[in-house]
Amino acid sequence: MMELLAAELQGNPEIDLLLSLRIIQKNIDPPKKAKPPPKKMSLRERLVTGPKTAEIVFPLSEAANTLLVSHMEPSLIGKKKGLADAIKRMISASTTVWEQELTGTVLRFNEEIAAKIVWGNHDYTEYSSLQYLEAHSPEIPAPKPHGLIKFSNACIMLMTYISATTLESVWQSLTTDNKLFVQSKLQSIFSTLRSLKLPSGGNMGGVGGEGVQDYHLDDHEKQHLNTISAFEDFQFSIDVLPPSPAFTTFLRSFLPPSDKECVFTHGDLRPANIMVEQDSNGSYTVSGIIDWEMSGFYPEYMESMQVLHLFNRNVENDWYHYLPHCISPARHPERFLVGRIWDMSLGFAAAKRDKYLR
């Protein structure tokens, strides 16, 4: 370094020695490049490399058990380690149908069985509902349950595989006649669903006793309620800093008398949760209804209030026009509109979209 500095000084006696020293030092010791941050592992990768224990919470069907055993080392059959290792092999050999970064994924294992895997959530509402529907209304095209496994901090719900084509993905290509046909199918499905009533004295919400929930409150504990009036009080007190009591009372004064019974409710019906398949003529028909995590016994009006919760002023889509009549917001206009005003008063709005969602 001193030799370089001397050479600089010889060439220019009036040189700024401090500046030259800094330049020479920088060239000799260039700054080290920062290491790139480690790549985030997908949920699938974490499941294959992380968990070491597994527990069967709800019994496996014969088909699911056969699938699991086919991935198990013979020497580990019947052992806890064998179960965890077999699950990892199943996941490695599966096909990803859908994935939400870090929190959830849907995997397809074969033509018959798929799994919905949710990380950090041990709520069994969806699986309990699938069991209930299979027992009480098997004609509803919901996935059939094949068992549930707790895998470290993940919940693995095994169920029948339903075609991965959503109504959302094809809606804009449908003819008016095809849309009306889909509407009639959904009308039949949800009329049947709503014929399932909450037994006298039973608790509202999840059929397995999981309690009621509300889409405003993902992080709050569920409530165990058995009257509609208590449920409505819960709905109007769910924010940490709710609107004033006077405003809340004023808003509730527009509501009609409460329903007298609770019916089985999906709770999140939208085109993305409706699976379809094409017939030989190229028309689409309903093949399944998925995502039952918000389901359970709720007031008769509840489905109508929530069926368009993602529909806002930025959405250009005629899905609202083809809703099944039995769950249309037009059946309960006061409750639908009061619900929208309540959403706005909480600072809650439908998910932001591009200017027009078609």
Image (cartoon, helix red, strand yellow):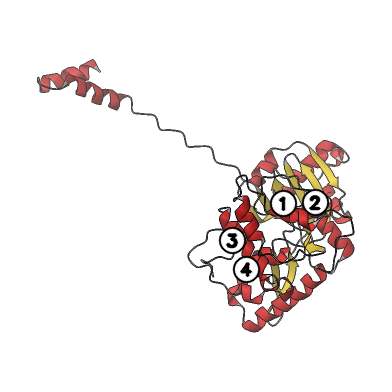
State the image coordinates of residue 188 (x, y, percent, origin top left).
78, 75
Label 4 vs 2, first from the N-terminus:
4
Q: CA distance from mark 1 to mark 4?
A: 32 Å
Three-letter residue code for mark 1: Phe
Q: CA distance from mark 1 to mark 2?
A: 9 Å
Question: Residue 225, which numbered label?
Answer: 2
Q: CA distance from mark 3 to mark 4?
A: 27 Å
Q: Secondary structure at mark 1?
A: helix
Q: Is residue 233 above or below residue 34?
A: below
State the image coordinates of residue 193 (x, y, percent, origin top left).
81, 67
Q: Which residue is mark 1?
A: 234
Residue sitting at x 72%, y 51%:
234
Residue sitting at x 52%, y 67%:
313
Label 1 vs 2, first from the N-terminus:
2
Residue sitting at x 79%, y 40%:
54
Q: Secondary structure at mark 4?
A: helix
Q: Which residue is mark 4?
A: 168
Q: Are marks 1 and 2 in contact (CB under 8 Å)?
A: yes
